[in-house]
Amino acid sequence: MPLSTVPAAPGQCIFCRLVAGEIPASRVYEDEQTIAFMDLGQLNPGHTLVAVKRHAATLLDLTPDEAAAAMRTAQRVAQAVAAAFDPPGITLLQANGREGEQTVFHFHLHVVPRHAGDGVGLAWPRKDPPRELLEGYAERLRRALASAG
Ligand SMILES: [Zn+2]
């Protein structure tokens, strides 16, 4: 089942336009496959977005190499955030699909500097299923992983 995303008209995706230099952004890093720039919302000072340059809506649409490149850039940016802003914590957030809290449907991840009591939160409603149900979930995943080859 495809993730619930909103396709952008060709040339209209806001991050594609940003990559093309058609709209302003406070860029901090760029390489062949990725770009990093300041999030307009700034949950905390230093909040940065890492996006792939090629239009890909979600994690599932990336090539393995793009996924690796995005995480390499996220680590590099996190190291710079630590050096420049010295936050006591850093959270990476990557959302996919409307129900996954994704709002811009071009793959990106957030590097968020964190501080005690900063009000940033993610509801975490644990279900704690019984062991046999958990093993059933694992079996479904093992089959999917095996057939994905
Ligand atoms: Zn795009």
Image (cartoon, rainbow, N blue to C red):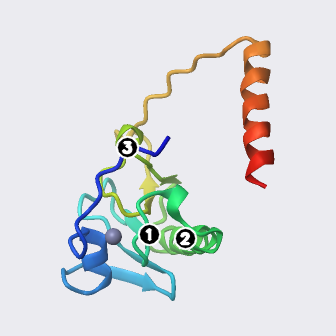
Determine if the C-beta at disc 2 is less than 8 A from ligand 1: no
Q: Secondary structure at mark 1?
A: strand
80 left or right of 51 in image: right
Distance CA(mark 1)–CA(mark 3)? 21 Å
Q: Secondary structure at mark 3?
A: loop
**Ligand 1 lies in which image quarter?**
bottom left
What residue is drawn where x is 25% and y is 87%? Answer: 21
Q: Do we see residue 26 in this rendering?
A: no
Residue position marked by numbered label 3 in the rendering: 4
Which quadrant of the structure image shows residue 68?
bottom right
Q: Amino acid at mark 1?
A: Val
What residue is drawn where x is 34% and y is 43%? Answer: 98
Residue position marked by numbered label 2 in the rendering: 70
Q: Which of 80 and 111 lies nearest the eye of the viewer?
A: 111
**Quadrant occupied by the C terminus:** bottom right
Q: Secondary structure at mark 2?
A: helix
CB atoms of marks 1 and 3 within 8 Å: no
Q: Which mark is residue 50?
A: 1
Q: Amino acid at mark 2?
A: Ala
Q: Which of 135 and 120 lies nearest the eye of the viewer?
A: 135
Distance CA(mark 3)–CA(mark 2)? 22 Å
Distance CA(mark 1)–CA(mark 2)? 7 Å
74 left or right of 47 in image: right
Q: Which of 10 and 35 lies nearest the eye of the viewer?
A: 10
